[in-house]
Structure formats: structure tokens, C-alpha cells
Image (tube, grey):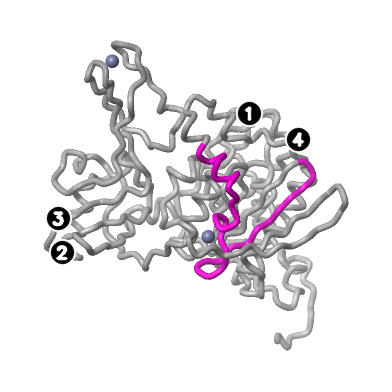
Amino acid sequence: MDETPLIVDDHDRYGRLRLISWWRQDRLAASRVLVVGAGALGNEALKNLALVGVGAIHIVDFDVVETSNLARSVFFRAVDAGRPKAEVAAERARELNPYIRVHAVNGDVARDVGLGLFAAADVVLGCLDNREARLWVNRQCWKTNTPYVDAGIQEIQGAVQIFTPPDSACYECGMTTQDYQLLNLRYSCPQLRPEDLRAGKVPTTPTIAALTAALQTQEALKILHELPCESGVAHVFSGVSTTMYSTRLTRRDDCLSHETYPEPTPIAVGCDQPARTLFDEARRIWDPSRRLTLVLERDLVTGFECRACHRTESLMIARTRVELLARACAHCNLATSPIVVSVIEEGEPLAEVPLRALGVAPFDVARLEAGPATGFFLLEADRARVLNPPAPRASNSP
Ligand SMILES: [Zn+2]
Ligand SMILES: [Zn+2]
């Protein structure tokens, strides 16, 4: 226990927080938190993290601000319409607390965020509105042993789930047969509009977003302070009856999310370099005698094949971009089939393509196989640009 008498310093930004017996401002200042989603929940979670002085925060979102966000998102203004949500939210959070670093990732969590950032985070906050993204974040957290606090809202109901790998139940353990069916629907109906699939049209209020994100951030703060925090549980709040209940999720031994990667070996390669460079560097430090194979974490579509006229159109996209997968042949107008690639072999033409174009994200962990051996390599050349990118110039609205 701290023996010093309580002296309230009104000039200390964190003075009232420091009065809490277990509060450790230095610990928060040294923490890194990844917030996935900059919608109603993400705005609130980011606001809370900025207020309490979490030292480094990364906020991820691929979407842009729309007028319909204004009634639920504390950081957005009418003049922000059309600007990336992550960028705007980060900018406003920096205004709220200029003594912390807030980094915007204007991209998709599944395609644009490397495993290295998940590993560097002390906790990940899921502020998402769909199962696909939650499942992806859950798996990335398990691979890197990073605690994951997920939040979800609908109308005036909210839920916060806490998962701590490797031992607790995870998000996928709690998925029902119906959840899997809805996930599969996305892949079997590429003609569904992405905006329908990505939801974001869930009816919610700013009150439930604030309540739920507050509870979520509070659990994250307990994790950052290493206070006891129940994991593998869901806390569900009903605003209709003003009641809350907690339920323990059952850990499933056959759950597909429970893969934890070993500590990766840092390698002096970045995602802008070709796969060949990764193979060459890995061979220098790993020295396997067999030919190397890069196992892609995200399936890659390298082209579209028309079975009728035997023509192939080359185009590299991630297989998760279902909205781009339904393509008609330019010659006969029949439906084409995507050519899916999940490994890159040393020496093949695709090894000359930059890792980024092969679907590898900045500061990712590359999984290489040499016969029966598997090696994990962290793309160290991307570290600075991901963990500590240069601060953007302050822009005071147009
Ligand atoms: Zn699980
Ligand atoms: Zn054709």
C-alpha cells in the first residue's frame, strides 16, 4: 500500500483517478489497446480509454462517417461526412487527451491488421456489429495470447464478453448452430449486398452504446491492472427491465479457434517486399534444407476462370471480399469460378509478388513450412510504421 497521505492536486489531469487505491496511472500510460470498430461502441470505448490516459490506442475501421452516425457517435460532426471513421475518431480522441498516442487504421481488421499488432496489444476491444469480424478477432487474439473484450448492442440491450486465451472459453465456443448458418450464408450468397451483410443497420441508441462500452472499458481496465476479472463469461444488460445477468460460457474442446502460435522469430522483412525476400531471409536464420512454403492466413483469389470458353482473367483479391467474387465472363457472360490459392511455394512466379498483394498485412506473422517443420516469423521491418506511425498534421476541420 502507498503510505503517502492523500493530497489532491487539482492541476493533475489524472488526480481523481489516482485516488483509487488500486489505480496505476503509470501502468495505463505504458499500455497499448487495440479498438476494433469506430461505430457507436467504438466511439465510446475510445473516449473512455483516452480519458483515463491509456498510452497507445489503435482504432480500426474501414467505413466512412455518415449522417446517420451522428445521433450515436460522440466524436463525429456533420462536417466529417465522407471522412474515414477511424481517422476522425482518432483525431478527436487526441483533442480529448493530447498526452496519449492514438493511431487510426483506416482498413478492414481481417485484411489490413497484422498479427504483430494483436501481439503488441495488452488487450483488444471488439466494438463490432457482425459475426465474421468477431470470429476473426477472436482467432487473432488466441494466436497471440491477447485478452479480448467483446461488446455488442441491439436496441436497448447490451452484452460484454471477456475472453482470456489460452484457457477460457472463447467467442467461437459460444457460437450456436444458427450463428454458423448465418456465417455460411455470407459465403454461399455472394450476390447479397455487402452493406446488408456488414449490418451496421442494427437499431441502437447512444445510451446503450455508452453503457455497454463503459462496462467493456471497465473490464479492460481491470485486465490492464491485473485485477481479478472473470473470463469466459458474458454480462448481458437489458435496458427494458434494467437488469443484468452474467452467464458462464462452456469451453469446447473441439473449438477451431484455440490455436496459439509460439513466439514468432523477428525477421528483417516488410510486407512491401516480395515473398522471395521472406524465403531468402528465413533460410538465412532458420536454415531448413527443404523447400519453403508460405501458408497464407487469408485465402487469395488470383483469377477467375470461365469453364465454358477456357479463359482466365487474372485479378488478385482476398477471398473474404465476397462482394467481388460473383463475376461473369467478359466473353460468354456465364458465371466464372474464382481460382483460390492458400500457399505460396518457393520458386513459383507468385513468390515475386509483394507480400502485401498476397494478402499479408503490415507487421504480420508469416507462417512458413519446410516439410514437417513450421516456423513463425514477425515482419519486423513494419514495426515502426504500425506501432508508432508519424503523427498526422493537426487538421482543424475544413
Ligand atoms: Zn473456443
Ligand atoms: Zn466464357
The answer to whether any part of residue 115 appears in the image is yes
* The C terminus, quarter of image: top right
| Quarter where residue 243 is shown | bottom right
Secondary element under disc 1, as helix, strand or loop, is: loop
Q: Mark 1 to mark 2: distance in Å?
A: 53 Å
- Identified by mark 3, the residue type is Arg
Q: Report the residue at 88% width, 51% height from top.
A: 241
User: Residue at left 78%, top 67%?
Assistant: 10
Mark found first going from the N terminus, 4 or 1: 4
Quickly name the residue at label 4. 71
Mark 1: few/some/many CA within 10 Å (<14, 14-19, 20+): some
Mark 4 to mark 3: distance in Å? 56 Å
Q: Give neighbour class at mark 2: few <14, some 14-19, many 20+ (Cα, 10 Å).
A: some
Mark 3 secondary-structure assignment: loop
- Specify which label sits upstream in the sequence, 2 or 4: 4
At label 4, counting other C-alpha atoms closer than 10 Å, the crowd grade (few under 14, some 14-19, many 20 or more) is few
**Residue 194 versus residue 390 in the image, above or below:** above
Badge 3 crowding class, 10 Å Cα cut-off, few under 14, some 14 to 19, many 20 or more, is few
Q: Which residue is mark 3?
A: 291
Q: Which residue is mark 1?
A: 81
- Front position among marks 4 and 3: 3
